[in-house]
Image (cartoon, grey):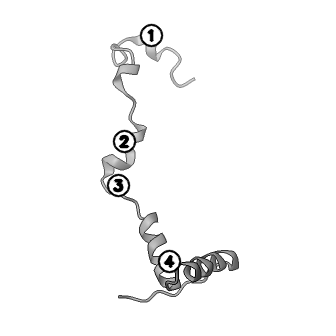
Amino acid sequence: MKTLTVKLPESLFAEIESSARVRKVSKSEIVRERLEKAKPAKTTLWSRIEHLVIEDDSLPRDISFNKKHLRDYGR
């Protein structure tokens, strides 16, 4: 396992130290667990932008060719 040294704010260090003491594990174990939880589960491009896609049911059927939908576009 590799070693990494970081500087933490006092409040975060105290929180980690307290959790480690209560659970009777090392501070490193607490930090590893938190880093694993924070790791993004979704790794594909689609999964990262999926929430930006508009459902086609909510759009007019003729949006791409009907000029009335573009009348105020860009103003």
Residue 20 left/right relative to 48: right
Q: Which residue is mark 1?
A: 68
Q: Which residue is mark 3?
A: 42
Going by the numbered disc 3, the residue's amino acid type is Lys
* Mark 2 surroundings within 10 Å by alpha-carbon count, few (fewer than 14), some (14 through 19), many (20 or more): few
Residue 58 left/right relative to 27: left
Residue 58 spot, x, y in % from top left: 40, 20
Q: Secondary structure at mark 3?
A: loop
User: Comparing marks 2 and 4, which lies closer to the viewer?
Assistant: 4
Residue 61 spot, x, y in % from top left: 33, 14
Residue at image position (39%, 19%) is 59
Q: Is residue 75 above or below residue 69?
A: below
Residue at image position (49%, 14%) is 71
Dot placed on the residue nearer the N-terminal end, 4 or 1: 4
The residue nearer to you, when weighing 50 against 31, is 31
Q: Which residue is mark 2?
A: 50
Q: Is residue 51 above or below residue 64?
A: below
Residue 65 spot, x, y in % from top left: 33, 15
Q: Quadrant of residue 14?
A: bottom right
Q: Quadrant of the C terminus?
A: top right
Residue that sits furthest to the right in the current view: 10
Say which mark, if any, is on residue 22. Answer: none
Going by the numbered disc 2, the residue's amino acid type is Glu
The span from disc 4 to disc 1 (Cα, nearest Å) is 56 Å
User: Comparing marks 4 and 1, which lies closer to the viewer?
Assistant: 4
Q: Secondary structure at mark 4?
A: helix
